[in-house]
Amino acid sequence: MTTAAGAAGWSDEVDEVLAGDLTAGLAYATPAGGAVVTAVAPVGLRDRTAGTVGFTTSQGFGKKLERIRRDPRVALAYHAREHGCSRSSLYVLVQGRATPRPHDRATLDALRPQIARHLGEPKRGRLFWDRWLAAYYADRLLVDVAVERIVVWPSLDCSGEPVVHGAPLPAAPAPPQDPPAKGTGPRLDAPQAAARLSALPHRLTAMIGADGFPLVLPFEVAGTDAGGIELLVGGPGFDPGARRAGLLAHDYRPQLIGLKARQHTGWAEPEPADPRHVRYAPHTATGFTAPPNKTLLLLANGYLARRGLRRARAAR
């Protein structure tokens, strides 16, 4: 069902999710026509009147920012309720066009109370912490997303009939994609990848839809062998036909202190009779684990921010 109101007219219950979720899955396009999914902190950034949402990121993630500038069509999946401020059962998928802002320390400073509500108060101390974390704050960028469509499912597994705010969903599915030059089969150990994905509680997959916006849905690992991973995808599943797709599995703790994440890009082949059943061949993998200790996390953040800031400045 599509509502008559524009995307800026989202409901109070949707606004509660946008305001309260601690993390969201950001999906954006790759140059080859696939999708990457990564976890971001939206920290309640949204403006219902203007029809925008947002998130923060690091200047050190130059590839992500470059891809967003190349194709600003992104999606944010609000898919997990632990440790945030919302208790809604809704799965909220926001699709829109992203614009990274130039670094603005004054704006970030003004947002500190809002950021602290989600991520906790930063450590302070003139002898060490203020100087160590200066690069972390100098490294942050805000990304605004002009909302074109919000798809809302009544439950986090995307079961039930969705409600669409804003632009209607594409009438026709995306066409199948040409296979990659290096072949469609797994380039990694598929059973090992499946085990690592299954060990983490939140799992998302993304493909590029017919209108160029990523579609992000939850998935379960239904089986695996040397030939690939069997995915059971929520909601409508994938568009029919083989295509490139991304996976994210992650876990997090209060204030995002203690993180685990696994990401893949690869080749997806939905079953023609039921595109919720997808055969997935992982081609690339990344992952990280952040310590569940705030002092260690801030030390790591300060180091990574300094390194990222140096790289970003060198690339200018």
Image (cartoon, rainbow, N blue to C red):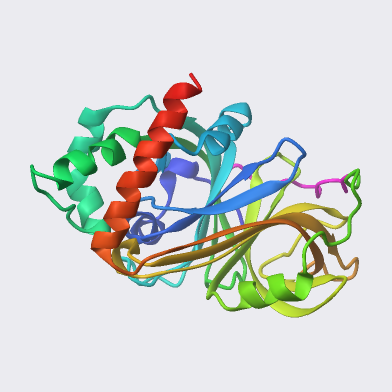
In which quadrant of the rendered view does residue 188 lie?
A: bottom right
- Judge whether residue 48 can be spotted in this image: no
Camera-side residue: 115 or 310? Answer: 310
Q: Residue at x 89, y 55 (%)?
A: 184
In which quadrant of the rendered view does residue 33 lie?
A: top right
In the picture, measured across the screen, residue 172 lies left or right of residue 235, that is right
- Position of residue 1 relative to residue 221, above or below, is above
In the picture, measured across the screen, residue 176 lies left or right of residue 291, that is right
Q: Residue at x 38, y 50 (%)?
A: 42
Camera-side residue: 269 or 167? Answer: 269
Farthest residue in the top direction?
316
Query: In the rendered structure, does residue 172 fall within the stretch colored magenta?
Result: yes
Q: Position of residue 153 (x, y in %)?
A: 55, 65
Task: Identify the image quadrant of the N terminus.
Answer: bottom right
Span colored in magenta:
166-177
Farthest residue in the left direction?
126
Taken as a whole, is the magenta stretch helix, strand or loop?
loop
Query: In the rendered structure, does residue 194 fall within the stretch colored magenta?
Result: no
Q: Residue at x 87, y 55 (%)?
A: 242
- Judge whether residue 112 can be spotted in this image: yes
- Position of residue 284 relative to residue 160, above or below, is above
Number of marks present in the image shown: 0
Camera-side residue: 292 or 154? Answer: 292
Q: Residue at x 34, y 35 (%)?
A: 139
In the picture, measured across the screen, residue 30 lies left or right of residue 185, that is left
Q: Position of residue 12 (x, y in %)?
A: 35, 57
Q: Position of residue 251 (x, y in %)?
A: 47, 70
